[in-house]
């Protein structure tokens, strides 16, 4: 049933789910109730995942289980933490899980963001393990598992739980113990590390993370390499599991666990529409007039300020470029759109300070009365403005040291309606394994990085157009709805096979 006035997802999820209840689990919630000056206000956090999954949830009338992080969240829920959303339309249920400060500190800032995040990105200088964080992570994963089990209990028929990300490495195993026949699958958004890195978690803990994930029926990674790392880790650290690398399956506790690569993408049409609007045309013209008049060129980058994104390395490459090629001063301007992130963690607060200082130093060194080399926007800007920035640019730099996928690269390609821009992309992103036509760089190699920027600046308009045209064509065949479609097709395929097997066992 379509709901009047709502954008319809391009995947008819109901077709996959049949009569099966859909329960989505994520750390962040799709709607936050906040106390404001005029009473309770509802905020919908920006981000690709919420914008893709919210219409899906509206369609399925399922339940979204997430941390109730808003200041007025408790005021609007029932005693189980449930509230109908979207406000006024009431299409599906949001089930909030409550966390206190110690939970947030241990589970979220502690184990998820100070242990698993750096470890999975292989940036071990940021890795910190504390037993207390780990204990909290276990407690919170158990609490989420209870909430999901309760939601599954409330429906009369079958249910499918879909867990998002590294915040919940243990939830599937706990949930499996509570509801053995529930279909559970999980998407891991970040890289999965090789065994030598995972084992930096204390003995017992890295095995627990793997056994936790093996509670799933299907585990989805961004690319094959991460899936292969996971299979290797299981083979090395979980002796009772039987791994089949060719089939990407594991037999564990008499169950079959499937593993696969499902590269995430973006809502391509939404970005194209934002970039094509009349207001966008006007803003793009203003940006080009201000920063890229005539034959001058405009570079852009967009990130959360995170040590995985290679921001100091990018600044170093730009500084080297303007040092070695003074003729590029006043001819090449760079627009940095960076939003502060996880600022409660010292490593992130320090990085933000370091980035600000470097930008100021570069602008002082090379700037002239008429020209600022780096135009720095240090905030979370709305997606319409991002679309304008992407469209106006002659080049975009994504320089992650490691990145599960990197959606900025895809957003840039989607918004390049004039096919003018070049994409400079770190070879250590998931996107680099998917996108053909980018200029690949290694952000650790400053000379190679600078050479990549020079290649982009010197590339003929025909060559840029040819590459961008190809990238845009490929992106249209791989949108977030294709991602959703392929995951649900695989999940329901496995579910169907399990049902047939159960019937056969029952018939014997
Ligand atoms: P991230 O590392 O957060 O997430 P990334 O793919 O880099 O995700 O996308 C960041 C998103 O934030 C983009 O949609 C971008 O537009 C937005 N954003 C960044 N800076 C912004 C700003 N200043 N203002 C407004 N918006 C901004 C994780 C993994 C990635 C993976 C995603 C999705 O680390 O590898 O691609 O999940 O699975």
Image (spheres, rainbow, N blue to C red):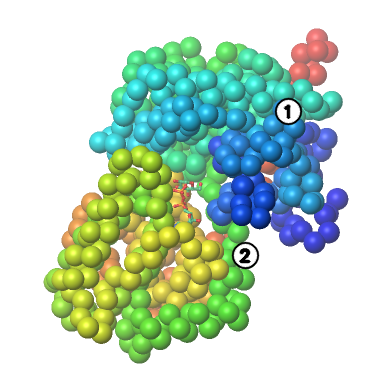
Left/right placement of residue 324 relative to residue 75 reads left
User: What's the distance in space between the residues labelled 2 and 1, CA to CA?
Assistant: 37 Å
Residue 465 placement: quadrant: bottom left
Q: Is tag 2's residue or tag 1's residue first in the polypeptide sequence?
A: 1
Label 1 belongs to which residue? 79
Residue 293 can be seen in this image:
yes
Instruction: Write the residue at 69% across / 32% down.
Output: 81
Between circles 2 and 1, the one closer to the viewer is 1
Left/right placement of residue 120 relative to residue 180 reads left
Instruction: Write the residue at 62% across / 47% down.
Output: 35
**SS at mark 1 in the image:** loop
Of residues 7 and 91, the one drawn nearer to the viewer in this rendering: 91
Horizontal and vertical percent for residue 427?
34, 53
**SS at mark 2 in the image:** helix
Outermost left residue: 324
Of residues 218 and 269, the one drawn nearer to the viewer in this rendering: 269
Residue 156 placement: quadrant: top right
Instruction: Write the residue at 38% across / 45% down.
Output: 343
Residue 260 placement: quadrant: top right
Label 2 belongs to which residue? 270
Does 31 appear above or below 325? above
Residue 235 can be seen in this image:
no
Q: Residues within 10 Å of mark 2 (few under 14, many from 20)?
A: some
Residues tagged 2 and 1 counted as in contact (Cβ below 8 A)? no
Could you say which disc has been placed on residue 208 in the image?
Answer: none
Instruction: Write the residue at 79% across / 33% down.
Output: 20
Quadrant of the image for the C terminus?
top right
Does 283 appear above or below 34? below
Left/right placement of residue 454 relative to residue 41 reads left
Left/right placement of residue 41 relative to residue 366 reads right
User: How many discs mark residues in the rendered view?
Assistant: 2
């Amino acid at each position: 049933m379509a709901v009047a006035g709502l954008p319809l997802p391009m995947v008819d999820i109901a077709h996959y789910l049949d009569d099966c209840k859909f329960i989505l689990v994520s750390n962040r919630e799709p709607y936050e109730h906040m106390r404001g000056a005029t009473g309770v206000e509802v905020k919908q956090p920006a981000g690709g995942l919420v914008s893709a999954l919210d219409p899906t949830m509206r369609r399925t009338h399922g339940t979204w289980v997430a941390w109730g992080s808003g200041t007025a969240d408790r005021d609007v829920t029932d005693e189980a933490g449930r509230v109908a959303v979207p406000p006024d339309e009431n299409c599906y249920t949001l089930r909030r899980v409550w966390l206190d400060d110690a939970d947030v500190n241990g589970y979220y800032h502690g184990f998820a963001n100070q242990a698993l995040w750096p470890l999975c990105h292989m940036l071990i200088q940021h890795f910190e393990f504390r037993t207390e964080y780990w204990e909290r992570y276990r407690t919170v994963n158990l609490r989420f598992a209870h909430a999901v089990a309760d939601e599954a209990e409330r429906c009369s028929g079958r249910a499918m739980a879909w867990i998002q990300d590294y915040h919940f490495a243990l939830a599937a195993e706990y949930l499996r113990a509570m509801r053995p026949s529930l279909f559970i699958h999980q998407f891991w958004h970040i890289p999965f590390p090789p065994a030598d890195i995972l084992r930096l978690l204390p003995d017992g803990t890295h095995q627990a993370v793997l056994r936790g994930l093996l509670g799933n029926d299907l585990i989805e990674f961004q690319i094959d390499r991460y899936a292969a790392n996971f299979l290797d880790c299981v083979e090395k650290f979980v002796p009772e599991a039987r791994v089949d690398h060719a089939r990407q399956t594991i037999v564990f506790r008499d169950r079959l666990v499937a593993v696969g690569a499902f590269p995430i993408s973006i809502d391509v049409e939404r970005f194209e529409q934002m970039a094509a609007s009349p207001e966008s045309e006007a803003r793009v013209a203003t940006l080009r007039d201000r920063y890229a008049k005539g034959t001058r060129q405009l570079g852009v980058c967009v990130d959360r300020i995170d040590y995985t994104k290679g921001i100091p390395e990018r600044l170093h490459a730009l500084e080297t470029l303007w040092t070695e090629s003074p003729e590029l001063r006043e001819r090449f301007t760079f627009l940095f759109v960076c939003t502060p992130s996880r600022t409660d963690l010292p490593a992130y607060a320090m990085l933000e300070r370091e980035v600000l200082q470097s930008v100021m130093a570069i602008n002082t060194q090379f700037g002239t009365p008429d020209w600022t080399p780096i135009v720095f926007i240090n905030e979370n800007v709305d997606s319409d403005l991002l679309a304008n920035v992407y469209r106006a640019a002659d080049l975009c730099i994504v320089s992650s040291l490691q990145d599960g996928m990197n959606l900025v690269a895809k957003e840039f390609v989607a918004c390049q309606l004039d096919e003018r821009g070049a994409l400079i992309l770190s070879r250590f992103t998931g996107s680099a394994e998917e996108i053909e036509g980018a200029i690949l760089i290694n952000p650790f190699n400053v000379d190679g990085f600078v050479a990549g920027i020079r290649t982009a600046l010197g590339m003929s308009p025909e060559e840029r157009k040819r590459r961008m045209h190809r990238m845009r064509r490929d992106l249209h065949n791989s949108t977030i709805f294709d991602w959703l479609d392929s995951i649900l097709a695989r999940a329901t395929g496995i579910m169907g096979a399990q049902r047939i097997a159960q019937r056969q066992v029952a018939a014997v």
